[in-house]
Image (cartoon, rainbow, N blue to C red):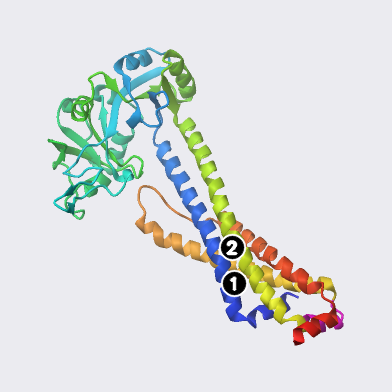
Amino acid sequence: MGVFAWRNLLTRPLRTILALIGLSIPILGVLGLFSLSDGLRNMVGDTLSQIEGVIVLSQNSPSPITSSMTTEVVDKIRAIPGVRSAAPEVWRLAPDIEGRGMTSRLIGGVMTKSWDSLLDQPVISGQDIPSHSGLRSAVYPRALKARGEGRFLDHGDIGEPRVVISRKLAKQLAADPKEPKRVGDTLRISDGEFEIIGIYDTGSMLLDGVILMDIHVARKLLKMAPETVSSIYVEADTPPGYEAVCDAIEQAEPGVSARGMNEVQANFGMLMGEVDKILMLVVSLALAVGVVGIVNTMLMSTTERFVEFGVLRTNGWSQWDVLRLVTTESAFLGLLAGAAGCLLAWLGTAAVNPFLGGGIRLGVTPGSMALGLALSLATGMLGGLYPAWKAARMLPMEAIRLGSH
């Protein structure tokens, strides 16, 4: 039966190829979308794994950039049992850097250079150097020591216009990307000149857009009040005590939100779960198009073969045999389309990955390939059910009569 069905597909190569294209593209879309979803999950997971402490923000603030507290909160948190260190920070979107800002400006009919997107907009992070120097799990000093150059902020940089930037920003902020900024170069931020003393590299898109400087210098640059704090990085005496510390912080200061990285990752997982539901909806629409293509192909194939089915029935084939034949043909189409879609997805991710940065890596896993093949097989068989039923229910002489016209 399988050999017979396969030969029937080969006798109509053009129609078979068109059906394969119609279904392999939705399968390619399925694998591409889920590959992107997995890439984002892995990137965020790798990023959060670098942050070991607790981030304290003002209540209902989605990020440090929108958070605002006072230095009084820092003193209250430091007095909580179990808190080893509390390091205040200020965070805001950076003002114009090297004459470029987040918004394009039209001058004399010529559009000036601007950041390509919000994700490329650098962020200013002002750190309280004395309290940050005592941290055990600070991300940026470790990244600089492991893969960077120069040095990190120390007590001698308090009140001084000195910055630490990422390797990504060193290229992005240079006049020529082939000649990135180096340690010792200057960086013009708003109306001030800042010396670059260090360059770090975390490998994460979410962390590599930060310009670090002394908190007092940052407040002056960003025109923030002296007592303003955006976030507080908290370390516990023992890492297993972070959940208890989060609860203690929120009880001591009801107006703040203390977030451990496990909680942040869980929230992101819930968000990606909702995204996956939307992806499944898109996938369902794409597969519906594939089903229509299979139905059309198999209907045309069965209509042209009424005489063949009639002859087979007169030679002892049952309705079930005809049903199996047509369904097997449609299943072969589905499997071939799934294999083609998996191959295209694998080649596509391999071609795209060298151009991606920021810790995002796309990949087609064996599990996703199995899912793609299963979906394509199910789609093919579903698309062939009606044509198979229509061919099987015809009486032998009726099929011969209709096919001969």
Q: Which quarter of the figure is the N terminus placed in?
A: bottom right
What residue sits right under mark 1 in the picture? 19
Q: In which quarter of the image is residue 286?
A: bottom right
Task: State the residue at coordinates (77%, 74%).
Answer: 391
Provide the secondary structure element on which disc 1 rests: helix
Q: Position of residue 87 (x, y in %)?
A: 31, 23
Horizontal side of 333 relative to 202 (left or right) equals right
Task: State the residue at coordinates (58%, 71%).
Answer: 20
Task: State the residue at coordinates (72%, 77%).
Answer: 302
Viewer-closest of 93 and 166 = 93
Decide whether residue 373 is among the magenta residues: no
Q: Position of residue 369 (x, y in %)?
A: 57, 59
Provide the secondary structure element on which disc 2 rests: helix
* Label 1 Cα crowd, 10 Å radius (few <14 / some 14-19 / many 20+): many
Q: Read off the magenta span.
A: 309-317
- State whether residue 332 is above or below residue 237: below
What residue sits right under mark 2 in the picture? 289
* Residue 364 appearing in the image: no
Mark 1 and mark 2: Cα distance apart in space: 11 Å
